[in-house]
Amino acid sequence: MDDSLQNNKNNRRKFLRISLLTGLSAVAAKTVFADIPVDPENEPGEMVTLLSPDGQLVKVPKEKINYMEKYISPEASHQGIPHRKFVMVIDLAKCKNARKCVEHCQKAHHLPPQQEFMKVYLMQESEEAAPYWMPKPCFHCDKPLCVSVCPVGATYKRSDGIVLIDNERCIGCKFCMTGCPYSARQFNWADSPYLHVDQPYSPETSVPGKEGTVSKCDFCPDMIRDGKMPHCVTACPMGVIYFGDQLEDIVTNGDETIRFSELITSRSGYRHLEDLGTKPSVYYLPPVNRQFPVERGFDQPDEINQRYKDVPFVKKMHKN
Amino acid sequence: MESNKRKQELLKEFLPQLEKTSFAWFAWVAFLLIAIFFAIYALILQILRGHIITGMRDNVVWGVYIVNFIFFMGISYAGALVSGSMHLFKTSWRGPILRIAELTTIVALFIGPLYILLCIGRLDRLPFLFMYPRIQSPITWDVIAITTDLFGCLIYLYLSFIRDFALMRDSKDIKLPKWRMNIYKALALGYQDTPTQRNRIKKVTDIMSAMIIAIAIIVYSVLAWIFSVTLQPGWHSTIFGPYFVIAAIFSGAGVILILMRVFRSIYHLEKYITKKHFVGVGMILMILSMFFAYFTFSEYLTKWYGSKKLDDNLIQILFTRYFWHFVFSNYVGTLLPIIIMGIPRFRTINSITFAAVVAVVALWVNRYLIVVPTLETPYMPIQDIRPDWILYSATWIEWSLTFGGIAMFCFLFTLAAKIVPIIPVSEVADAELEMSEVLAHGQDSHEATRTKSIIKHAAIKKEDHDQ
Amino acid sequence: MINKTRLFRQSLIVLLLTIVASFQLMAQETASSIELKALKNSDDSRIFNVKLTGESEAGAVPVFEATVDFYTIAEGKSELVGSAVTNKEGKASLKLGKETRYLKSKEGVAEVKTSFKGLGKLIGSEASVKFKELNLQVTLSEKDTSNTIHVKASSIGPNGEMIPLKETNFNLYVQGLFSKLKIGECFVDAGEGTFEFPNNIPGDENGNLKIFVRLEENEDYGEIEKAENAKWGNHRSGFAEPERSLWSSGAPIWMITTLIILLAGVWSHYIYAIVQLIKIRKEDKKIEQK
Ligand code: SF4
Ligand code: SF4
Ligand code: SF4
């Protein structure tokens, strides 16, 4: 009795909210689009703005994915997608720190603003060398030290090359975080509204996260099973990130489809810190013949730009 | 039965410590309990609010907790190594300090693992360590090793207690409540000091003391491997195993010295724990500090001399941000014991204790310098604007749990000293007896002959009894 | 509490704005635009994809649940061939089987128009594509080590006669997991062309490949596609995870043996010690009995 009352109230509030938002969007669509304040606690599901056939701008709930239908349980997630070996190729010549990969990945994985599965570094190998932007997900290493050191098998390497974390198994010892040389892993230090998502947990989605456990980029196997590419790949406006199956030797960034071996050989692809021997599944194409000057990457809010203040290039820039 | 008489006499001397509890004792215990409860409060906060209230973040994922873990485990292994080897090599003056070393082992071994638990994000899943163990993980090695070590130490400790338990059971002067006497009786396991029983105990203790030494070395190396199997530049080092073992005995010897000093004044043991003992353990401390200095030097020299970028970064911040920590832990901490022990004029009980205190604190800082700066210089540069994400600094939660652990150590030690005499009565009495016999036989007190005489002595006793 | 008052205040503002805005909206009409693409499939059916968007201040916004109609038109005549409803991305598609008869001009050109009529404040829009029929045949042949794709293409004249296709490039693709990989072009002249299929395309785990021959963005014929399956891939052996390694679930044998030896060694001594203790206890009992 009480429950249903509560529910009713909630629904009413939700309804009110939707209609208000609809009204709002009719007024000043532009500003509304820019940033509808998202309150993760009471967010009434994800909304998309559309035109109704009679010309009204409306907000309708986004197509709800039926999670149960595609649900991959933690046990089932140990099995890789058969006969595949996923690779990613990141073309550093095209990256301008647009951060779309970061944002879309964060959104899809319900990450708070400061937590990033994909991070964009400003790298400069030496003072004289040219600086460049380097997006860095988890490398899904073929010799993953993070997996080797886990005492309970909460993180594992699958036959399709993907390294996943089962946060229902993870005891939060953080050993894997010291084991990973690429700082790919993050700990859920506190409980937060972002960890409460109404969706069954699967290691393949990494959602919902759990306090006291570790999470990281998962290569989006849920998307792959759906025939779609990871969020970061499709989000990049520059087509920086290529994704595909090494066994069929095809990678694509959504626009362009190339043979993986051809791309790597013709553009001298490399893996970051190859000498550590972890054998990453993520390759980089060197930042030569660049499409953008590196300065274009500072087209970001201050709190992002501030991150790079210790890079020699930035220091020099500030001096002049 | 001359030895038995002497033993009872000796026991009588120590009985007041077990029987009476002074006001100061209660005050001390109350003080410790307050510290412990405060730590428990901090722990509850940490469990409720998550690890966010510690200073640990995504780069420095382990902080003072793991430092304390290494520290207490080190003390424990040192206690085992010192008592084990003193027993095995029949060090003539071991008697009065053996029990302190043994108690140190076991008490520290109860506290150390608690700190690794504090690093764990989900304590509710602790059973997973046993339900889904992966043998490849050094943490699994450590779980197995610590459990094994704990059992070994308990057995060893018990062996060394049995004879004293039996003495207390048989003592007529003892004024203790009935229930305590019953406990002693049960614990004494019906030991009647018959020659067969005596031989049995001796044989088992010998074996276990050898075992304890081996286990302590392996277990502490396993702990070092938790760090050195990773690729972190400050940790990925082949000498970490022996380095940690040496550091452990070093700090443990320091703690034993401090405890000797403390019990000497409180229990008025001036007669038993003499300067000879301080110099003896102090010598061990000095030798170990030399070894430790040597290992530290070769560890950092190679890093400094080579030009690897990440090693360089590490050395860089060790000599800038952590300059004074570095100087204190690696220069003062090692040189002071060497100077004080090296120059006979400086060797007083108090100065040796002072050197021990400095060495112990320096060792703690040394572990901090191994753990934290390494995690602050990862392979991928830290590009962040949140200060606490870039640099680690422990919060009051971590500090109160650290002091809580130390308080716990003191508390358990205080309790243990209430239960058994802090001087192993049987051991000391036997040693005295041996001594007098050796003198009576007019032999020189060379170690080898002495060992023989012990055996002879045992044989004589056996005949005695058989008659 | 604070939250509630804030929400209240916000809603008030929003309400006011809405009222103001609705006055504005009444006078305002929204233009729509429609995009149409057609593709002839392997089975000679045709698929028509449309995307309907409306102009708004924020740029193009998809129009959803709108009905779009499709007509075949030629020489002033027009017939409805079907309709479809847009989804939330503003997209709709219509598939017409190969039996569909399109109205044709004298030159044999068919035209399909799609139109959105408009409703309320949204103004309607139209788009159309033109195409001629093309007869496309793809055959695969294997000889020794070389695999060849033969393409035959001819259009149909006004009197039903076959006219071989002249100087046209067809694109060749193989299907990948997410997209099609272009492997080359086949030049067709006098109605025929051949293409040597490369022998280093892996295909799936059995070496199966799905090959597409496509005519793309052709002025006369529109987009046409023919797909064929072939077992021409040379798939390398899969990515095999080592069975017992540091990072697999099973540990390397040497680790297990070492561990067992060590533990057996240590614990047997413990057991020995405990047995000795038990013996001491028993001896005591004996003494008491005496
Ligand atoms: S990048 Fe790090 S977390 Fe990812 S697989 Fe490699 S070692 Fe593991
Ligand atoms: S933190 Fe979790 S995933 Fe990482 S090693 Fe520990 S149990 Fe395994
Ligand atoms: S692959 Fe998926 S999880 Fe990884 S960075 Fe891209 S979107 Fe994020």
Image: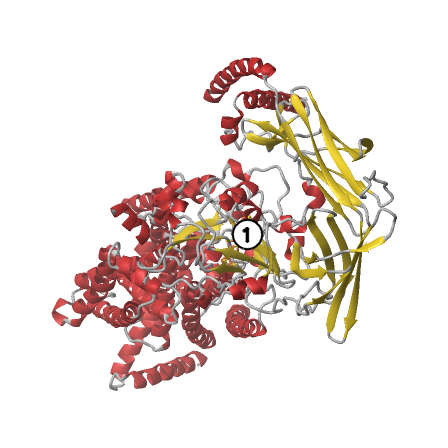
**Residue B180 percent location from the top left of the image:** 43, 53
Q: Would you name the residue on which mark 1 appears?
A: A170
Q: Is residue A56 shown left or right of residue A141?
A: right
> Image quadrant of residue B103?
bottom left
Q: Is residue C272 shown left or right of residue C113?
A: left
* Figure check: C124 above or below B296: above
Identity, as a three-letter code, of the amino acid under mark 1: Cys
**Residue C11 percent location from the top left of the image:** 52, 17
Q: Is residue A63 shown left or right of residue B26?
A: right
**Residue C273 percent location from the top left of the image:** 50, 71
Mark 1 nearby-residue class (10 Å; few <14, some 14–19, many ≥20): many
Chain of the residue under the numbered disc 1 shown in the image: A
Q: Is residue B287 shown left or right of residue A81?
A: left
Task: From the viewer's side, name the closer residue of B2 and C120.
Answer: C120
Residue at the farthest left position: B345
> Image quadrant of residue B172?
bottom left
The residue shown at (25%, 83%) is B445
Task: From the viewer's side, name the closer residue of B186 and B400.
Answer: B400
**Residue B413 percent location from the top left of the image:** 35, 55
The residue shown at (76%, 44%) is C131
